[in-house]
Image (spheres, rainbow, N blue to C red):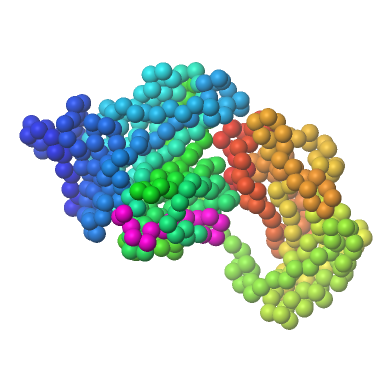
Amino acid sequence: MNKLVLVTTWVSFVLFLLAIHVTVTEAKANVVLSNRYLQMVYDPQIGRIVSLLNQETKTEYLLPSQISPFMIHVDPTTSNMWEATSRETLRFDGAPQWTLQKTDAGQQLVLQYYHEEYQISAVLSIEVETDAFTRWQLELENTGTTTIVRIDYPQLTSARAAFPHDRLVWPEREGQIVPTPQGINEIVYPGVASMQWLLYGNKQEGLYMAVYDLNAEYKTLRYQGAPMGIRFSFSLWPFLEPGNKWSAPLVEVGVKQDQDWYWGAERYRNWLTNEAGWTIESPQWVEEMTGFGVQFIKNSRGELIMPFNELPLEASRVTGRGGNVLEIKGWHLGGFDTIYPEYVPSEKAGGAAGLRQATQAINAAGRRLIFYNNTRIANKVSPWYQEQATDNDVKAIDGRTYDEHWAGYTFSVMSPTAKGWQDKLVEHQEFLVDIGGSGMFFDQVGAMHPVLDYNQSHESCHASYRVCRRA
């Protein structure tokens, strides 16, 4: 059974018993939202969340001296999101108007903020239901003349004293445990951060924070360690122009017993499969794959290592080593790491006809052939790049491209959301499917550190589309 405690004057208490919706304009005591797992306390005098208590362990997770639950960064010099960058930080330091109400599942605290100078409205809703998590929803409305570039949300400072032998568990690439985190550190999602959650505490219990962004847009997970406490926040980039509204993705803040990496990863995976709908059904042969070998056709100097007509024999060798799939690299014009994205079969290795014959022979033997493709970068001397006039590149705010150098060539990072880049890659995949190829290895989609992409040439573009965003 949920329990809601509102400690005010006896008059307010009577009103609460008689109504399912309570509004207080001048509260003189704290507001408490609780259930059997947690208790969250809001101080309306200062407009802060001042307590998050684990009801089962009686551990207080937060320091009482909290800052505002969110902070907004604006660019007052422009109303154009394509010209905007973070120039000024706005703090909502005053106590907001607040409303406390019952919901079908529990209780909800609604906080209403307004920044008079920049004419920005914010509504923050925090709901406590029957489990160990609070759910946060934030909405912004920009009625001023500036661009809202970034928001840090939520901002919570946990007490180190609550967690002897404290540690941070967060999804840096394959996952990382940081003992007694110090200083300032952040990881960027998607790419460096493989998921959108973190846990702070010890092996017995801890604070859980997660953002459930269905669009998988660019964001950072950040901590700032100090002797007494450690502050956590997520940063999101709405690039909200005047006259527009924006709703942040759902955030969860909760308490967790027996904190570990596997629990957090499994909870996130359940969201991916059951709510986000990002799962793609794999073909049967992928499920039955026992292993695969890798063979270079041409190296980065263009030297022939193996012609296509020898691939069936090489695939049989892979079978002898316990695998049933062969991957080939450098099978195209120029060789490995050269003239991307000109994925045309190398004439020196046997051309399109030779690759087709080899692929069909491998399939006939009950094996599989997959093809390496770099889906992140394009060679600046390739015919396709010369024709596309940087329409598909990722660009910084000053218009420069993000260049890399491999095998004596200069490559530019492409945006996975750019229609021209998608079409070019699909063009070659259709050919590989036609000759009987079983799969493609899409390399380095998330290899580059994600950045803000200011290229307006992309079709269906918006400043909040980022490198590594799910295309």
The dominant secondary structure in magenta is: loop
Q: Is residue 146 above or below residue 263?
A: above
Residue sitting at the far bottom: 320
Seen from the viewer's position, the closer of residues 217 and 61 is 61
Q: Residue at x 61, y 41 (%)?
A: 451
Q: Residue at x 57, y 51 (%)?
A: 192
Seen from the viewer's position, the closer of residues 109 and 449 is 449
Residue 431 is at least partly visible in this image:
yes
Residue sitting at the far front: 227
Left or right: residue 202 versus residue 142 is left
Q: Residue at x 72, y 37 (%)?
A: 401
How far across and down, in percent of the image, does residue 410 sit? Answer: 80, 45
How far across and down, in percent of the image, does residue 260 sit? Answer: 41, 63
Magenta stretch containing residue 22, yes or no?
Answer: no
| Magenta segment boundaries in residue numbering | 161-175
Count of all numbered marks drawn on residues in the image: 0
State which quadrant residue 336 falls in.
Answer: bottom right
Q: Residue at x 44, y 20 (%)?
A: 118
Left or right: residue 83 versus residue 319 is left
Residue 344 is at least partly visible in this image:
no
How far across and down, in percent of the image, does residue 423 sit? Answer: 72, 43
Q: Is residue 8 above or below residue 422?
A: above
Q: Quadrant of the C terminus?
A: top right
How far across and down, in percent of the image, does residue 131 sit? Answer: 28, 53
Magenta stretch containing residue 164, yes or no?
Answer: yes
